[in-house]
Amino acid sequence: MSKKSAGPMLIGGLAGETGTNIETIRYYEREGLIAVPPRTRGGHRAYEQQHVQRLSFVRRSRELGFSLNDIRKLLQLADSGTMCTTA
């Protein structure tokens, strides 16, 4: 997971870089946990580094025992840009 891609990668590259099954990636897309990437002219999904980071977060969260619903809520908090502060 340490290599950084210079450009878009296909789903097999994303699967290899994150250690995630291709069908699991497609499932997470359908569930809205990772963004559906744009397509190449040939119709292949073209993933970027942000997909690697988000999928890695989802995968690690699952390993820690979080449910998909819990992960969805965490991602919504992160996407909102709201910062938590202490007084």
Image: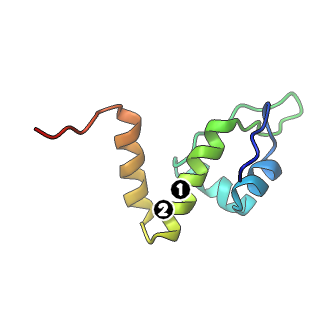
Q: Amino acid at mark 2?
A: Ser
Residue in view at x 54 percent, y 62 percent: 60
On screen, residue 85 versus residue 28, left or right, reads left
Pointers 2 and 1 in contact (C-beta within 8 Å): yes
Q: CA distance from mark 2 to mark 1?
A: 5 Å
On screen, residue 58 versus residue 4, left or right, reads left
Residue in view at x 72 percent, y 50 percent: 2
Q: Residue furthest right?
A: 42
Measured as percent of width and height from the top left, residue 75 is found at 42, 46
**Residue denoted by label 2:** 61
Q: Quarter of the image for the C terminus: give it.
A: top left
For numbered disc 1, what is the local secondary structure?
A: helix
Q: Amino acid at mark 1?
A: Val
Measured as percent of width and height from the top left, residue 47 is found at 72, 38
Q: Residue furthest left?
A: 87
Residue 79 picture quarter: top left
On screen, residue 71 versus residue 59, left or right, reads left
Q: Is 62 situated above or below 41?
A: below
For numbered disc 2, what is the local secondary structure?
A: helix
Crowd rating for badge 1 (residues with CA inside 10 Å; few <14, some 14–19, many 20+) = many
Residue 83 picture quarter: top left
Measured as percent of width and height from the top left, residue 7 is found at 79, 30
Q: Residue furthest top?
A: 41
Residue closer to the observer: 5 or 36: 5
Residue 78 picture quarter: top left
Measured as percent of width and height from the top left, residue 59 is found at 57, 60
Residue closer to the observer: 57 or 39: 57
Crowd rating for badge 2 (residues with CA inside 10 Å; few <14, some 14–19, many 20+) = some
**Residue denoted by label 1:** 58
Residue in view at x 42 percent, y 52 percent: 72
